Image: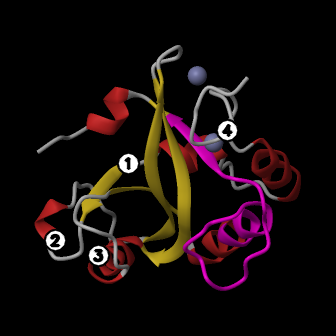
Amino acid sequence: MSCYSECDCSCGPEGEKFDSIIRSETNFGITSNDLIHSNMGWFCGFDNLKQIRWPISKDDGVYILWEKNDYCSEHNLFHSKAIYVGKGQVKTRIYRHAKNKGFTEENLVYFTFVDIENRKAKYIEQLLLDLYDFPLNKAEKRGVNKFCGYITQGEADFGSM
Ligand SMILES: [Zn+2]
Ligand SMILES: [Zn+2]
């Protein structure tokens, strides 16, 4: 039985397919746990750039945008669904999303990122796109599985303003 009503997944391992492939093909030492839980922040609306919760790196990396959309009262975890994966200069890119992506004022968009060299970020982005469906990525859509994270209240509240 699913832990959530908005998704058929349950609290537990995250991104197992990603982990097994990246482990067999690279020695980057990056796991889906890193992608889902590192440097979590959020922005809200595209007009209000003050409402970006730091920290955001100025360096190259790979980042994911998330929608937090459900709660499991048995495990006390929030369901977050990956909606976009990107790479590049994380700070610039996330600002651009906050300004341009057309997210509404009410929707808090969460982000996570890892700092990593661009050529590795490219690999990670490609592997994620091959395996999973990111609804806001227009190009190179191939994956069909959902990339889901399970986050605690503490993570969701971290660094509140
Ligand atoms: Zn899910
Ligand atoms: Zn659960």
Q: Position of residue 35 (x, y in %)?
A: 56, 51
128 in magenta: yes
Of the residues under marks 1 and 2, which one precedes in the sequence? 1
Of the residues under marks 3 and 4, which one precedes in the sequence? 4
Q: CA distance from mark 1 to mark 2?
A: 17 Å
How is the model colour-coded?
secondary structure
Q: Residues within 10 Å of mark 1 (few under 14, many from 20)?
A: many
Of the residues under marks 1 and 3, which one precedes in the sequence? 1
Residue under label 1: 40
Q: Residues within 10 Å of mark 4 (few under 14, many from 20)?
A: some
Q: On residue 121, which mark appears?
A: none
Which amino acid does the dot numbered 4 rest on?
Answer: Glu
From what the image shows, is residue 94 above or below residue 83?
below
145 in magenta: yes
Residue nearer the viewer, 99 or 93:
99
Q: Tell me the quadrant of ligand 2.
A: top right
From what the image shows, is residue 48 above or below residue 79?
below
Image quadrant in which the C terminus is located: top left
> At 32% from the left edge and 52% from the top edge, which residue is drawn?
41
Q: CA distance from mark 4 to mark 2?
A: 31 Å
Which amino acid does the dot numbered 3 rest on?
Answer: Tyr
> At 59% from the left edge and 76% from the top edge, which residue is drawn?
137
Is there CB contact under 8 Å for labels 3 and 2? Answer: yes
Determine whether, in the image, residue 140 is placed left or right of residue 160. right
Residue under label 3: 95
Labels in figure, total: 4
Q: Which residues are magenta?
A: 125-150
Which amino acid does the dot numbered 2 rest on?
Answer: Leu
Residue under label 4: 14
Q: Position of residue 83 (x, y in %)?
A: 54, 63
